[in-house]
Image (cartoon, grey):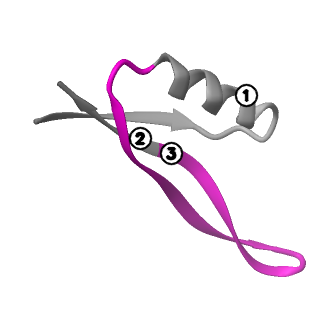
């Protein structure tokens, strides 16, 4: 079993459509989607932001 890891940058606009197009374009099977969450501080207090997604694909 071979795996490939893809990195998909997260941008607020049209992210759902970008993720859908990317996943539909993959040839193999998606094993997992891992978000990279980074803590940030704003006026309201501490929060978190997703910078990018790691997508693990199994290639046959």
Q: Indicate whether 26 appears above or below 8.
A: above
Q: Which residue is rendered at x = 89% and y = 79% of the image?
A: 44
Give the mark toward the camera: 3 or 2.
Answer: 2
First of labels 3, 1 by sequence position: 1
Q: Residues within 10 Å of mark 3 (few under 14, many from 20)?
A: some
Residue named by callout 3: 53
**Which structural element holds mark 3?**
strand
Q: Quadrant of residue 16?
A: top right
The quadrant in which residue 39 appears is bottom right
Give the overall secondary structure of the magenta segment: strand
14 or 46: nearer the viewer: 14
Tell me the element at label 2.
strand
Report how far apart the C-alphas of labels 3 and 1 lie in the structure: 14 Å
Determine crowd level at label 1: few under 14, some 14-19, many 20+ residues with C-alpha closer than 10 A: few
Q: Residue at x 62, y 21 (%)?
A: 21
- In the image, which residues are magenta? 26-53
Residue located 17% across and 24% down the image: 60
Taking depth in this image into account, of 30 and 6 the one nearest to the observer is 30
List the residue tagged with mark 2: 55
Q: CA distance from mark 1 to mark 2?
A: 16 Å
Contact? badges 3 and 1 (CB < 8 Å): no
CB within 8 Å, label 3 to label 2? yes
Rendering quarter of residue 19:
top right
Outermost residue toward the right in this view? 44
Give the side of residue 54 with respect to residue 21, left or right: left
């Amino acid at each position: 079993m071979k795996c490939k890891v893809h990195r998909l940058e997260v941008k607020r606009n049209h992210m759902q459509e970008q993720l859908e197009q990317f996943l539909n374009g993959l040839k193999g099977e998606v094993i997992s989607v891992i978000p990279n969450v980074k803590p940030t501080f704003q006026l309201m207090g501490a929060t978190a932001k997703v910078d990018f997604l790691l997508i693990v694909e199994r290639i046959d």
